[in-house]
Image (cartoon, helix red, strand yellow):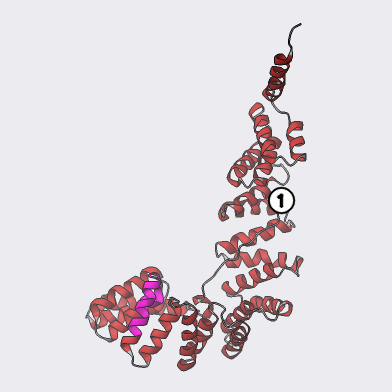
């Protein structure tokens, strides 16, 4: 009698190999998706596209499964191929935008969302994500334009209203910002960050007393909130209330000893109080904390100029101008320095630049506050 057991074992091994050797069909890929086997489904779609490289729907489906695996770069490539083969595939531009968004490729994401809105202007998800993409790259005017309809459609979404409020604030649309902050404070009256931003909006509207009241509310609610003491101190500093400002800057520095903005303005107060050594120590510490903090270089240059230390004053002021040539203060101090040095043409150039920049200068407390974009997490429709 012939022993058939080894033959049966070999057959059992070979059957799945033979079955797999046959190219998967779209129905095989969809069956794997129904089982939520995304990796296997993506591989099956890849085989389908290898057999039929003109199958746009297969590339699109592969992109969806790759997105589910968080392989966004590969997903974006699949979506682009699908769109190249069939530009009219429904939903693929939005999926492409999402894949690019998840990679923080804001420009590519914005292009995709704009394409969605060109054919479907009422697509709220594309509108929201486009606004978020603009927010991420600090294009606040455009962000506000697209986030406003999204926030109206979702009045209970505090994060969306917060983003719109900040976009309006940084875009210098103070009235829009105020409206949003009022809504947020109605929903959450004990939100210290919202009181801070409300204070910034009031300050930009030229209402310093009301702005100070908002910052004081934030301080009472959360005395350890980062930047609250600094922002309140800056308002007092702008109002030349230096004793009050000094107290707030010192409180901020107990929370963060390397807060370059608080160090710099506290140094400015020490200079005004005729304590030059203390002033230089604080401002030099600020430049060590952040060598690219422009205002610290302006302050150092100004102090060196007053001390007739011209050799050190010039590089500090030139460094400040290199960091941001659009601010007039460093140009003015450099012009004064060149006047002292007898460099008439250079002095005239810098002072002329100062006058031109002052004409369009519109500084407020918001321009000195650090911007931290929140981690926005859109809901995918994949």
Q: Is residue 187 visible?
A: yes
Q: Please identify the quarter of the rendering in which residue 374 is found.
A: bottom right
Image coords of residue 308 (percent x, y): 24, 84
Q: Nearer the viewer, residue 135 or 205?
A: 135
- Main secondary structure type of the part rendered in magenta: helix
Residue 206 belongs to the span the image colors magenta? no
Residue 285 belongs to the span the image colors magenta? yes
Q: SS class of the residue under badge 1?
A: helix
**Count of residue discs:** 1
- Indicate left or right for 3 with 108 as reference: right
> Which residues fall within the magenta stretch?
279-298
Image coords of residue 190 (percent x, y): 68, 81
State the residue lying farthest toward the front.
1
Name the residue rendered at 71%, 28% in the picture.
Answer: 24
- Indicate left or right for 34 with 142 as reference: right
Q: Is residue 86 visible?
A: no
Name the residue rendered at 63%, 40% in the picture.
Answer: 78
Image coords of residue 71 (percent x, y): 61, 45
Q: Is residue 198 above or below residue 171?
A: below
Q: Is residue 45 above or below residue 352?
A: above
State the residue lying farthest toward the top.
1
Image coords of residue 375 (percent x, y): 61, 62
- Mark 1 surroundings within 10 Å by alpha-carbon count, few (fewer than 14), some (14 through 19), many (20 or more): few
Q: Please identify the quarter of the rendering in which residue 322 is found.
A: bottom left
Q: Nearer the viewer, residue 215 or 225?
A: 225
Q: Which residue is mark 1?
A: 119
Name the residue rendered at 54%, 77% in the picture.
Answer: 226
Question: Quadrant location of the N terminus?
Answer: top right
């Amino acid at each position: 009698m012939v022993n058939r057991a080894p033959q049966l074992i070999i057959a059992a091994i070979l059957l799945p190999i033979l079955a797999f050797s046959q190219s998967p069909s779209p129905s095989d890929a969809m069956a794997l998706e129904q089982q939520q086997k995304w990796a296997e489904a993506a591989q099956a779609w890849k085989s389908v596209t290898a057999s039929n490289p003109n199958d746009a729907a297969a590339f699109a489906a592969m992109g969806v499964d790759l997105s589910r695996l968080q392989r966004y770069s590969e997903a974006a490539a699949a979506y682009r191929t699908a769109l190249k083969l069939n530009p009219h595939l429904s939903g693929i531009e939005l999926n492409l935008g999402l894949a690019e968004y998840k990679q923080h490729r804001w420009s590519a994401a914005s292009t995709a969302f704009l394409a969605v809105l060109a054919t479907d202007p009422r697509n709220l998800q594309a509108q929201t994500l486009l606004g978020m993409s603009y927010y991420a790259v600090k294009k606040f005017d455009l962000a506000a334009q697209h986030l406003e309809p999204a926030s109206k459609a979702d009045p209970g979404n505090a994060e969306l209203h917060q983003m719109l409020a900040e976009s309006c604030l940084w875009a210098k649309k103070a009235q829009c910002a105020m409206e949003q902050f009022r809504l947020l404070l109605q929903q959450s009256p004990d939100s210290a960050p919202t009181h801070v931003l409300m204070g910034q909006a009031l300050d930009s509207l030229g209402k310093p007393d009301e702005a100070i009241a908002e910052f004081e509310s934030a301080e009472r609610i959360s005395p350890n909130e980062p930047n609250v003491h600094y922002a309140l101190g800056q308002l007092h500093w702008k109002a030349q209330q230096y004793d009050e400002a000094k107290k707030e800057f010192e409180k901020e520095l107990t929370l963060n000893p390397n807060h370059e903005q608080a160090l710099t303005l506290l140094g400015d107060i020490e200079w005004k109080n005729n304590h030059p050594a203390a002033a230089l120590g604080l401002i030099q510490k600020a430049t060590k904390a952040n060598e690219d903090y422009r205002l610290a270089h302006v302050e150092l240059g100004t102090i060196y100029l007053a001390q007739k230390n011209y050799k050190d004053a010039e590089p500090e002021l030139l460094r400040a101008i290199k960091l941001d040539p659009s601010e007039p203060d460093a140009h003015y101090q450099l012009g004064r320095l060149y006047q002292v040095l007898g460099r008439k043409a250079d002095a005239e150039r810098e002072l002329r630049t100062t006058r031109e920049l002052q004409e369009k200068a519109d500084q407020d407390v918001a321009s000195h506050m650090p911007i931290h974009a929140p981690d926005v997490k859109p809901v995918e429709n994949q």
